[in-house]
Image (cartoon, rainbow, N blue to C red):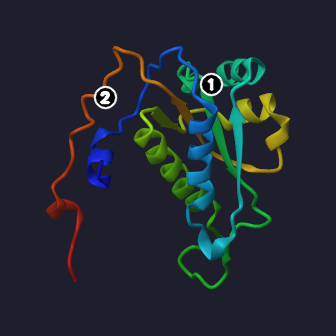
Amino acid sequence: MDFLELSKTRYSVRKFSNAPVEKEKLLKILEAGRLAPTAKNSQSQKIFVLCSEDAITKIRRATKMAFDAPVVLMVCYDKSISYKNPDDTHYKDYDGGTVDASIITTAMMMQATELGLGTLWARGFNSQDIYDEFPEIKDLELVCLLDIGYPAQDSRPSVRHEDRKPLEETVRYL
């Protein structure tokens, strides 16, 4: 499948089947994140794989944004090593960690889609609730959750999924 077809196929899954995610597929997804670009190659990402019964119980207790996925990745970054741009006058104290984590999450999301898995990039949660459940991330910046699993048989894209603006509304040539 070419990349544009893959992009059309991907949608935010909010209903997962009970089928487990195979270890080799999960490793391929994590490798896609490892290979993703980061500013100045800082590689400040820290990914926590939640797949044990205990970890899944904790994330479901902290947020509904886990959507009963069998695997949830907590995508974080380490502020002490993320790229900073002190010369940027528009973004004083710019920290590239959030952008890097977003790029990494996108790479993992697209790899999961290619492998026949569904994903949901989740950010609609109270971070403190997750920090309370997972003290291992206390010194990191939590950017998002990436829910991963096989879509349930009746899972469907949102009605807004195919609602895309034409290029003329989003692109300008200068």
Kindly identify which numbered label has been placed on residue 149: none
Where does label 1 land, which residue?
63
Question: Foreground: 147 or 170?
Answer: 147
Question: Is 100 displayed left or right of 3 in the figure?
Answer: right
Above or below, 69 relative to 111: above
Count of marks placed on residues: 2
Question: Foreground: 72 or 22?
Answer: 22
Q: Inspect the image, locate mark 2, and give the three-letter code of the amino acid beneath it.
A: Pro
Q: Are marks 1 and 2 in contact (CB under 8 Å)?
A: no
- At x 23% / y 67%, what residue is drawn? 171
- Locate residue 22, reporting x and y percent: 59, 29
Q: Give me the C-alpha separation between circle 1 and circle 2.
A: 21 Å
Question: Is 88 displayed left or right of 56 in the figure?
Answer: left
Q: Inspect the image, locate mark 1, and give the three-letter code of the amino acid beneath it.
A: Thr
| Res 92 visible | no
- Locate residue 128, reporting x and y percent: 73, 35
Q: Residues within 10 Å of mark 2 (few under 14, many from 20)?
A: few
Above or below, 78 relative to 164: below
Secondary structure category for the residue under label 1? loop
Residue 104 image-quadrant placement: bottom right
Which one is in front in this view, the residue at disc 1 or the one at disc 2? 2
Image quarter (top left, top right, bottom left or bottom right) of the C terminus: bottom left
Q: Residues within 10 Å of mark 1 (few under 14, many from 20)?
A: some
Question: Foreground: 47 or 65?
Answer: 47
Kindly identify which numbered label has been placed on residue 157: 2
- At x 42% / y 33%, what residue is drawn? 116
> Mark 1 or mark 2, which has the lower sequence index?
1
- Locate residue 96, reporting x and y percent: 61, 66
